[in-house]
Image (tube, grey):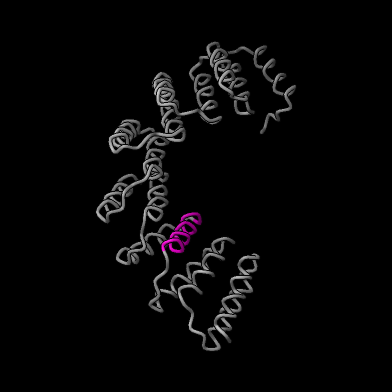
Amino acid sequence: MDVVLAMTLMHGYCLHGEVGKALDLFDKAVGDGVVPTNVTYGVLIQGCGAEGMTDKAYELCRQMRERGLLMSSSNFNLVIDGLLKDKRWEDAISLFEEMVDTGVLNIFTYNPLIRWLSLHHKFREALKLWDRMMEAGVKPSIVTYHSLLLGYCQKGCMDEAVKLYSLMLEKGFTPNAVIYTTMMKGYINMKAFDKACVLLDEMRQYGVSCNDYTYNILINGLCMVGGVREVDEMLNRFISEGFVPTAMTYNSFINGFVKAGMMDSAFTMYQQMCEKGIPPAQ
């Protein structure tokens, strides 16, 4: 079988989501004596990744290693991402260790691994991987910082989060709405609404615009700490900035009113929600 023709057909099958046919053709081509190249494997790995076929992508990666072929950074990162999504940490880290000395590891390799460790509250391992990343000459991005911050904030480790946040500023990174909102939610979960408001002021000072999630997090936080009467003023201020209340906004209000024993206000808010055509369970 002509290798160029086989490659063209495999690529076409993958583009149209018919990865199974591409894999069958690959097996036939190899059986006919065609020697697969990095490009051949790359096309199939990308196709498997797009279809969520992590097992097959991982198998192809292993075949490449056995044949002495070096995969590209993008394809390698694709396999790592798939393994982590399938909760196969052992396979992901094993593959990572095999590829450390190949030169294909980059920030897009480290980010998902550090994020996975952080979200599973394995901070010691995440920091060790961070150190290895720095030693390899790979500099963290704002995504890397956010991955670790997210884990700290979810766990309630706000002292560690603040230290990392300060380090991020020292390194010249400008926090975005995602960073600020993550920190605010961490403080709100710890019932430290005043510290969340300090971050909101800082956010505005630096000209960073709030997104809908930021607004909702703050409204929900104020309701959580019993500031239902003050939250109306906050909502009006947010609306003047262009915020459009969502189901999450109304649910926060309703829950806050119910907790405060203000059932008439809760019902009024529910009626407003229905009048605007917003499903309560959205």
Q: Residue furthest bottom?
A: 32
Q: In the displayed structure, does residue 14 sit left or right of residue 204?
A: right
User: Is residue 191 in sight in this rendering?
Assistant: no
Where does residue 47 sit, x and y in percent of width and height?
Answer: 56, 65
Where does residue 77 sit, x and y in percent of width and height?
Answer: 44, 59
To which quarter of the image does residue 109 belong?
A: bottom left
Q: Quadrant of the N terminus?
A: bottom right
Of residues 263 and 4, the one drawn nearer to the viewer in this rendering: 4
Q: In the displayed structure, does residue 199 sit left or right of residue 163?
A: right
In the displayed structure, would residue 223 be above or below residue 20? Answer: above
In the displayed structure, would residue 56 be above or below residue 178? Answer: below
Where does residue 201 sit, x and y in percent of width and height?
Answer: 42, 20
Q: Quadrant of the C terminus?
A: top right
The answer to if 80 sits in the magenta stretch is: yes
Q: Residue at x 42, y 36 (%)?
A: 154
Q: Residue at x 58, y 79 (%)?
A: 6
To which quarter of the image does residue 278 belong?
A: top right
Q: Residue at x 29, y 38 (%)?
A: 171
In the displayed structure, would residue 142 be above or below residue 48? Answer: above
The answer to if 14 sits in the magenta stretch is: no
Q: In the displayed structure, does residue 164 sit left or right of residue 108?
A: left
To which quarter of the image does residue 52 belong?
A: bottom right
Q: In the displayed structure, does residue 174 sit left or right of residue 36?
A: left
Q: Residue at x 61, y 68 (%)?
A: 14
Where does residue 94 sit, x and y in percent of width and height?
Answer: 37, 63
The magenta-colored residue range is: 73-86
